[in-house]
Image (tube, rainbow, N blue to C red):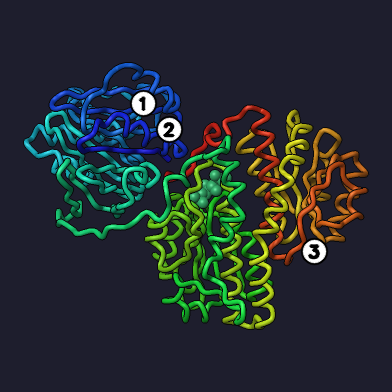
Amino acid sequence: MCGIVGYIGNRQAYPILLDGLRRLEYRGYDSAGLVVEKGNTVTRVRVQGKVAELAKKVGAQVLEGFCGIAHTRWATHGVPGEVNAHPHCDEEQDVFVVHNGIVENHELIKRELQQEGCKFASETDTEVIPHLIKKFLTEGASLEVAVGKALKLIKGTYAVLVIAKSDPGKIVAARQSSPLRLGIAEKEFIIASDPSAIVSHTKKIITLADGELAVINKDGYVISELQSDTIIDKKLEEIEWDMSEAEKGEYEHFMLKEIFEQPEAVKNSLRGRLLFDEGMAVLGGLKQVEDKLRKLKRLHLIACGTAYHAALVGEYMLEEYAGLSTEVCVASEFRYRKTILDPETEAVLVLSQSGETADTLAAVKEAKQKGVLTLGIVNAVGSTIAQETDAGVYNHVGPEIGVASTKAFTSQLTVLALLTIFLGRQRDMSLVMGKRIAEELRALPVKLEKVLAQSERIREIAQYYIKTTNFYYIGRKYNFPVALEGALKLKEISYIHAEGGPAGELKHGPLAMIDKNFPIMAIVPQDSVYEKNLSNLAEVKARNGRIIVLATEGDSEITKLAEEVIFIPKTLEMLTPILSVIPLQLFAYYVAVLLSKDVDKPRNLAKSVTVE
Ligand code: AGP
C-alpha cells in the first residue's frame, strides 16, 4: 500500500532515493518524503502529493549524505498531507522511520507514551514507532536493539526502515507481513518494498521474511530473527527481469504498454508448460503435490479484484473441462466466513499479481490454519504469498506497474487453462481434448495481436462515450466475469460508474435503468449461450438502449442489434475471455485518457493493497 526505499553506500543517497520512490509510486502516491543523513546531521523533506512534488520542494537544495530512507504513501490513518507524510520522527528529531503497514495497537501505545510526556505531531499510527525507539535508545540500547524492543510491542503489519542521527551510517530494517527486499550491490545496499526500486542498481537481492530484522551499513549487513536475536544466513536470489521491463518505453502509460505486452505475456506464461503430443500441461511448481491434487474433490479459488474475476473464469474452466467441483470467493469474505474445508479432499488456490495483497494473504493463512493444501498463481517471484503457499505456478509476465491490472489477468486465465489441462488429464479429460486446448492456447498470441490491431477503432468508439455517466456490462458463462472485469477497468481509471452483471439477470432488475443515456457493453461471442445473449440484446434494443457488442469474427447476424461491433477471433469457448477482455481494457484506457485521468495512478487506489 505504500512504497519504502533506503540506501546506504558510497554514492549520494538523495538521487537514488528519489529514483526509487518514482519506481514505487504505483504502490501509493498521496504524499511522499525522505530523510538523508550526513554524519550527525539529517535533512528531512516531506510533501503532500506525488514524488514529483517532493523533487520540486527539494529543488536546488543540495541534500548531501550517503545514507537515507524515503516513503511514498497511500493513507490509512491520517489524511494525506505533509504532517502525516513519512518519515516520522521523535520530538528530538533523532530517530526517523518509514513504514508500510498498520500498527493496530497504536492508540494504546500512543496514550502510554503521551502519559510519559511524548508529544505527537501527526495523526498517523506510524508515529508511535520512532517515539518507542527513542525511548529505548535513551535507556542505553543500540539502534538495532531499540528497534527490536519497539517492534516487539507492535501488533499489526510492517516493513520499516529506521535511521538515527545519534547512530549514523546505519539502516535498521524489519518486516512483518509487508514486503521488504535488500539489494546487494558493490559496497552499497538498496532496501525497498519491491525489486523495481532495486533492479537498476543490482539484480542480487535477499527477501526478508516475517519476523526478520536487518542491520545494514556501508560495509555489509546482518540479518537476525527479531524474537530470538539469532543471526540467520539468507540465500541470495536473482531478479529475473530487466530494468527495461519496468520502463514505459515508447508508450504514454504503463497500462498501454502492458495491454500491448499481452501476446508476449501469454507466450511467457505458456513457455515450456505444454506437451502437445501428450495433450498435457507441465507445471513444475505443482510436482510435489501432484498426488494430493489427484485426490482433490473440490477446489476453492480465492482472490481480490481483477484476480477474483480471473478466478470466476477458472471456475467455469475447471468444472466444464477438468470435471472438478470449484468454488470462488473474494479473499476479504473468505477470511471471515465459517468455511467448511476437508483437508483430505479440498484445497485452496489463491491468485495474486503482486503476491502481497493482505486479504489474499490472510485467506492463505486461514486455509493453512485448517490444514488445507494451499496453492498460488502469483506473478511477483519470491513475494509473500508465493512463499506462504505450499506450491504454485508463477505467471512470468514481468512487473505490472499500471494500477489497473491487464496482462496479469490474461496471464492468470492462461495459467488457469494450463491447470485445467493438468487436473483434467489426471481425471477424465481425453488426450484429444488435452491436445485441442493446448493447440488453441498456442494460437492465442497471434489472435491477441489481431484484437490489439483494432485499438484505433476502439479509441474512436471511446470518444463517443466520454460524457457517459453510467455503463452496464453483460456476459454469460465464461464472459460473465469478463463483464465484471470490463466494468472494473472503466470505473477504476475513468471514474465513470460501471457495473457488470450476468446477461440473464438483466430482466430481473437492471433493465429498468437502461435507456439511450445508459449504454450497454455486451460480450456475445458465438458460443454455447449465443442465442440466449441475442435475446438479451433484443430486450435492450426494444428500450432504446445503446449497445456496444463484442462478437466473433464473421458474425453478420449481430450487427443489426448493436450501434458498434468489435470482432474477436474464434477460439475455444473457455479461452474467449483472454480475447474478449482486450477491447474492454482498451476502451477503458482511451476513455480515461480522453478524460485526462491519471491512468497509471488513479485517485484513491494503489497497485498493491497490502493492508486490510
Ligand atoms: C485491478 O485492476 C486492481 N488493480 C485490483 O483490483 C487488483 O486486481 C487487486 O487489488 C488484486 O491485486 P493482486 O492481484 O496483486 O492480489
Q: Quadrant of residue 133?
A: top left
Q: In the displayed structure, does residue 488 sit left or right of residue 208?
A: right
Q: In the displayed structure, does residue 355 sit left or right of residue 271?
A: left
Above or below, 304 against 605 in this view is below
Q: Residue furthest top?
A: 60
Q: Residue furthest front?
A: 250
For badge 3, the amino acid type reads Asp
Residue 210 location (% of width, % of height): 29, 53
- The residue sitting at 69% across, 81% down in the picture is 432
Secondary structure state at the residue bearing disc 3: loop
- The residue sitting at 61% across, 81% down in the picture is 277
Q: Could you tell me if the residues under marks 2 and 1 are in contact, i.e. CB atoms within 8 Å? A: yes
Label 3: few (<14), some (14–19) or many (≥20) C-alpha neighbours in 10 Å: some
Please name the residue that numbered disc 3 is placed on: 527
Please name the residue that numbered disc 1 is placed on: 84
- Which quadrant of the figure contains the C terminus? top left
- The residue sitting at 57% across, 61% down in the picture is 267
Q: Spatial distance from mark 3 to mark 1, Cα to Cα?
A: 53 Å
Residue 314 location (% of width, % of height): 62, 63
For badge 2, the amino acid type reads Ala
Secondary structure state at the residue bearing disc 1: helix
Q: Spatial distance from mark 2 to mark 3, Cα to Cα?
A: 45 Å
For badge 1, the amino acid type reads Asn
Above or below, 318 against 205 in this view is below
Mark 2 and ligand 1: say if the CB distance to the nearest ligand atom is below 8 Å. no
